[in-house]
Image (cartoon, rainbow, N blue to C red):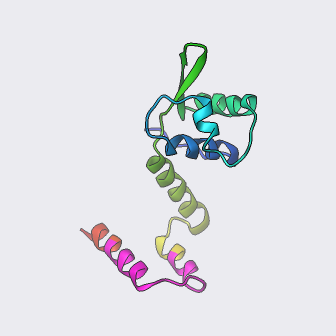
Amino acid sequence: MEPIPHLPDAELEVMQALWALEQYPVRTGDIAARLSRGWKAPTLIKLLSRLEERGFVRGEKEGRANGYTPLVSREDYLAAESRSFLNRLHGGSLSSLVASLFPRAHLTGEDIRRLEQILEQEDK
């Protein structure tokens, strides 16, 4: 499997709107309704075209309009971005990341229990 490339903010916003929808393919109007920016149709179509070129979405003709289906899941993208962040900023060290959060983080007891559960699962 090829690595998932990083998306610019505008393309990521479009993907997040696409991921928020439940049935595919969807039309540009459905995606536009989920966006916080009021992009005009040509801008959204250009962004979807870029996402299609990058392999993130599949566009298919549906009459006079196009329908779009995500080819990369939100979970896969999040995992790839998280690994990239960890490698770039912390040399791949999870303990370095967690240590950098503690001076300013206000972890609740539930946060700590959840982290312990994650570490226990990794240990198995």
| 79 or 59, nearer to the observer | 59
| 58 or 41, nearer to the observer | 41
Residue 9 in the figure: left or right of residue 124? right
- The image shows residue 105 at horizontal and vertical percentages of 56, 82
Residue 124 in the figure: left or right of residue 110? left
Location of residue 48 (image quadrant): top right
Quarter of the picture holding the C terminus: bottom left
Quarter of the picture holding the N terminus: top left
Q: Residue at x 55, y 66 (%)?
A: 91
Q: Residue at x 45, y 84 (%)?
A: 108
Q: What's the magenta region?
A: 98-117
Q: Residue at x 47, y 76 (%)?
A: 95
Compared with residue 49, is residue 92 higher up or lower down, i.e. above or below?
below
Residue 17 in the figure: left or right of residue 25? right
| 64 or 112, nearer to the observer | 64
Instruction: Provide the major secondary structure of the magenta segment.
Output: helix
| 66 or 106, nearer to the observer | 66
Residue 52 in the figure: left or right of residue 23? right
Q: Residue furthest top?
A: 63
Location of residue 104 (image quadrant): bottom right
